[in-house]
């Protein structure tokens, strides 16, 4: 029972230390993570029509060219946003793994120290019990 209380107290303390350390590292704000602010190309801008003359064809070609430029800009913007978001995810994962490793190392070290103390206490208790048994045997033999 005491062992469980000590272990619980230790883990609670270790978690609060890890929590405090996590706060000191600048992680992306996951609650208010920004949406992509990329301007979508105007799909309805390019509509094939009647090409009665070269002006209509030139106008259509200009619209297609503008649409293609907007589509490329949109694609580049979205790729940059996704790359940044993936980088933020990796940063969060790396920090979480480092924190978990640190808490585990501290917990394992503390549990080993406690277990060593328990072994010593058991050995001491056995030594006292043996001494008492020895004294009791001597008294019986009198």
Image (cartoon, rainbow, N blue to C red):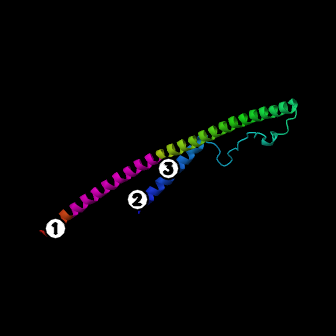
Q: Which residue is mark 2?
A: 3
Mark 2: which secondary structure? helix
In this orientation, which residue lies closer to the viewer: 127 or 44?
A: 44
Q: How far from the left and from the top, in percent, is residue 90?
A: 56, 41
- At horizontal 41% and vertical 49% (from top left) the residue drawn is 108
Looking at the rendered structure, the number of numbered marks drawn on it comes to 3
Q: Which residue is mark 3?
A: 14
Of discs 3 and 1, which sits in the foreground?
A: 3
User: Which of the image's four quarters has the C terminus?
Assistant: bottom left
3 and 1 marks in contact (CB < 8 Å): no
In this orientation, which residue lies closer to the viewer: 124 or 4?
A: 4
Which segment did they paint magenta?
103-132
Q: Is residue 36 magenta?
A: no
Q: Which residue is mark 1?
A: 139
Of discs 1 and 2, which sits in the foreground?
A: 2
User: Which of the image's four quarters has the N terminus?
Assistant: bottom left
Neighbour tally class for label 2: few under 14, some 14-19, many 20 plus, Cα within 10 Å: few
């Amino acid at each position: 029972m005491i062992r469980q209380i000590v272990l619980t107290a230790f883990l609670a303390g270790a978690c609060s230390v890890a929590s405090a350390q996590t706060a000191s590292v600048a992680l992306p704000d996951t609650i208010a993570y920004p949406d992509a602010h990329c301007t979508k190309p105007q799909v309805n801008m390019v509509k094939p029509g009647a090409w009665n003359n070269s002006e209509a064809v030139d106008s259509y070609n200009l619209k297609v060219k503008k649409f293609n430029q907007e589509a490329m800009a949109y694609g580049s913007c979205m790729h940059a946003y996704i790359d940044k978001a993936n980088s933020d995810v990796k940063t969060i994962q790396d920090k979480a793994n480092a924190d978990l490793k640190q808490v585990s190392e501290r917990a394992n070290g503390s549990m080993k120290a406690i277990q060593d103390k328990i072994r010593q206490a058991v050995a001491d208790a056995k030594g006292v019990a043996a001494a008492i048994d020895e004294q009791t045997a001597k008294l019986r033999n009198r």
